[in-house]
Image (cartoon, rainbow, N blue to C red):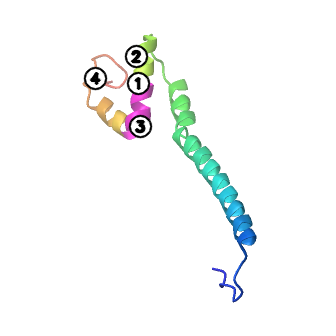
């Protein structure tokens, strides 16, 4: 941390430094916002890769949206755990 100067700073120097710090803070807030947005979508490539490997029966758009929303809201682990608790239908690949 910089040492305090023994000379008192004049008001214009303080205002100039304050503007610079506020601009830097605004830039950091923008970077943090971009990082949060990117972090919220990190699972998409993994989910799409998994979906590409399995066959999925036809479903309504609203069902697909509800599944995606549940993953977004509760996280992949919670949704996967809940789905694992659903009994398997006989004759499906998961039961064989």
Looking at the image, which residue sits at the far front? 11
Residues at marks 4 and 3 touching, judged by CB atoms closer than 8 Å: no
Q: Height in image: 86 above or below 81?
A: above
Q: Which residue is mark 2?
A: 63
Q: Give neighbour class at mark 2: few <14, some 14-19, many 20+ (Cα, 10 Å).
A: few
Residue 73: x %, y % from top left: 40, 34
Where on the picture, by quarter, is residue 20? bottom right
Residue closest to the eye, 49 or 2? 2
For the N terminus, the quadrant is: bottom right
Residue closest to the eye, 47 or 92? 47
Residue 90 in the magenta stretch? The answer is no
**Mark 2 and mark 4: Cα distance apart in space:** 19 Å
Residue at 60% x, 51% y: name it: 29
Q: Secondary structure at mark 4?
A: loop
Q: Does residue 86 appear left or right of residue 47 in this picture?
A: left
Q: Give neighbour class at mark 1: few <14, some 14-19, many 20+ (Cα, 10 Å).
A: few
Looking at the image, which residue sits at the far bottom? 6
Q: Which residue is mark 3?
A: 76
């Amino acid at each position: 941390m910089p040492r305090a100067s023994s000379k008192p700073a004049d008001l214009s120097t303080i205002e100039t430094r304050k503007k610079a710090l506020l601009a830097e803070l605004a830039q950091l807030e923008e970077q943090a916002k971009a990082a949060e947005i990117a972090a919220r979508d990190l699972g998409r490539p993994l989910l799409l890769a998994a979906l590409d490997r399995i066959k999925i029966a036809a479903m309504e758009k609203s069902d697909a949206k509800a599944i995606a929303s549940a993953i977004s809201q509760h996280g992949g682990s919670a949704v996967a755990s809940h789905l694992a608790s659903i009994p398997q239908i006989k004759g499906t690949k998961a039961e064989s």
